[in-house]
Amino acid sequence: MGFERNVLLGVNIDHVATLRQQRGTRYPEPIQAALVSEQSGADAITVHLREDRRHIQERDVEIISGCIQSRLNLEMAATSEMLAIARKIRPSDCCIVPEKRDELTTEGGLDAHASVEYLKDYCAELTESSIRVSLFIDADKRQIDAAYEIGAPVIEIHTGHYADATSPEQIKSELNRIVESAEYAHQLGIQVNAGHGLDYHNVLAIASVPVIRELNIGHSIVARAIFSGLGKAVSDMKKLICQIT
Ligand code: PXP
């Protein structure tokens, strides 16, 4: 038994913090989830520090950053507050996401095309702090061209539209869009990651795209953990995306 292909798994543990914040308790602790995830095959720990602090707190990011042995991928909006936090904590990776206060979760990719000059300067500041920058964008060539112009070494393709598609035609068309965009970005020398809305049923088609390097998955893993335990939920997902039988 070996890796068919080592697709990297970033486990997003935001919803462990959602459960804690919902009651204002001391538990469950995101750091505990981070360490169990790492032990169970996660290649990175992903957290989204939102402006409204609805789940992950700055303290969580500091503790996780100080304790994990794998990479910390900090998702954040491109604001000056977040830039200061990232420069202080220095995660390995920062994924720039759009953020709206009233959204349930990140609802679409960043409009990098509309803010090339701003993001060029913003990402350069992160790069100067030795943080690898990723832009969370839709599967759209215009956005990929913008990411290239900005100088982002990594993009994360938003897979939410694929995950939400219901008819076989819709699913096929969303998947094609992702495959074409991923290959286009790869040819430009950009590392291609993907995430959002991926679960145990829909992930394989995305994990099978040869140029996709890493998947960031949160909600489905934390949801499955209620029934199977977090360690098993993570290791099952890792095996699935690497197609280990
Ligand atoms: N990638 C990004 C950039 C995200 O914003 C999120 C959600 O926070 C995810 C991946 C994980 O999405 P999900 O929780 O649907 O797996």
Image (tube, grey):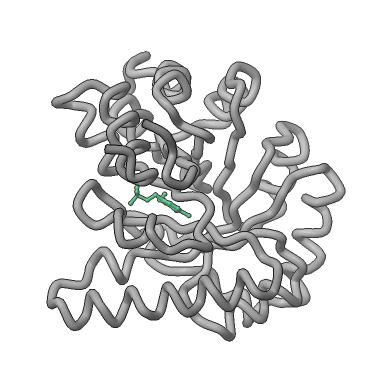
**Along the line of sight, which residue is nearer the eye, 187 or 1?**
1
Quarter where residue 184 is shown: bottom right
Quarter where residue 66 is shown: top right
Pick the quarter of the image with the C terminus: top left
**Residue at the (23%, 28%) spot, across then down:** 225
**Residue at the (42%, 56%) spot, across then down:** 195
**Residue at the (35%, 42%) spot, across then down:** 218
Residue 167 higher or lower than 238, as above or below: below
- Horizontal placement of 195 versus 97: left or right? left
**Along the line of sight, which residue is nearer the eye, 213 or 122?**
213
Residue 90 location (% of width, % of height): 73, 35
**Along the line of sight, which residue is nearer the eye, 1 or 109?**
1
Residue 158 higher or lower than 9, as above or below: below
Residue 128 higher or lower than 222, as above or below: below
**Along the line of sight, which residue is nearer the eye, 220 or 119?**
220
**Residue at the (32%, 21%) spot, across then down:** 231
Residue 194 location (% of width, % of height): 46, 58
Residue 121 location (% of width, % of height): 81, 65
- Horizontal placement of 132 versus 64: left or right? right
Residue that lies at the very extreme toward the right in this rendered image: 128
- Horizontal placement of 200 versus 79: left or right? left
Residue 238 location (% of width, % of height): 37, 37
Pick the quarter of the image with the N terminus: top left
Residue that lies at the very extreme toward the front in this rendered image: 1
